[in-house]
Image: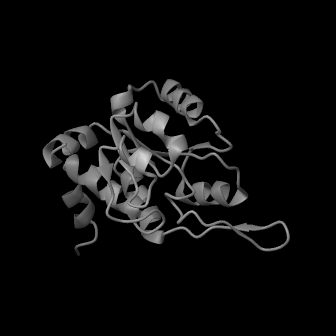
Amino acid sequence: MTDEEIFMHAKKVEVLIMDVDGVLTDGSIIYDGKDAELKAFNVRDGHGMKLLQRSGIKVALITGRESDVVKRRAKELGIEHVYQKATDKLVAYEDLKGRLGLDDKCFGYIGDDLLDIPIAKRVGLSVAVADANDELKSHAMIITKARGGRGAVREVCEMILKSKGLWQEVLSKYDR
């Protein structure tokens, strides 16, 4: 797929959905020996999601695991649509699609593993992070340069904003 074709798909994205572990994080899960679970999130990925939201593009999370850390991060970023413990991610995606009343072409999805394939095959813009599973990569329109948890989400956020002609407007807020 050419860059121009990818930009045409990205231009239609009204909602960007992401997996969490392996996309917003590097896939590591740290337990403290008690009951706490720790995850490291990339601040620039978070800022990219906020830039999308400020530009009118919704952000959603669909993850196969359940974690208070994810709930906290979503709240911090103002992410309204969060599906945890979604062992069949397609069910969560169909629910979100129904709630928002949008067609598949209006959604982008970033994943890293086999559970992400069913959504990647349906959305208008499918993305695999650089260190994603090869089977998912074969279904993705885009493979990021950055690895999961290391700026891959920011890369996609900027590309969507550029495709919609909104990037200069974003930059103008920082160029004083």
143 or 163, which lies in front? 143
Residue 62, horizontal then vertical, whole percent = 56, 44
68 or 26, which lies in front? 26
Residue 123 image-quadrant placement: top left
Q: Is residue 89 left or right of residue 174?
A: right
Q: Describe the colour scheme in one phrase.
A: one colour
Q: What residue lies at 40% left-to-right and 30% top-to-bottom?
A: 122
Q: Is residue 161 left or right of residue 99?
A: left
Residue 55 to residue 117: above or below: below
Number of marks present in the image shown: 0
Residue 13, horizontal then vertical, whole percent = 33, 39
Residue 153 to residue 135: above or below: below
Q: What residue lies at 45% left-to-right and 24% top-to-bottom?
A: 101
Q: Which quadrant of the rendered structure holds the C terminus?
A: bottom left
Outermost residue on the front side: it is 134
Q: Is residue 42 left or right of residue 103?
A: right
Residue 58 to residue 146: above or below: above
Residue 5 to residue 76: above or below: above
Q: Is residue 170 left or right of residue 66?
A: left
Q: Which quadrant of the rendered structure holds the N terminus?
A: top left
Outermost residue on the right side: it is 34
Residue 162, horizontal then vertical, whole percent = 22, 53
Q: What residue lies at 57% left-to-right and 57% top-to-bottom?
A: 21
Residue 130, horizontal then vertical, whole percent = 38, 60
122 or 159, which lies in front? 122
Q: What residue lies at 35% left-to-right and 44% top-to-bottom?
A: 140
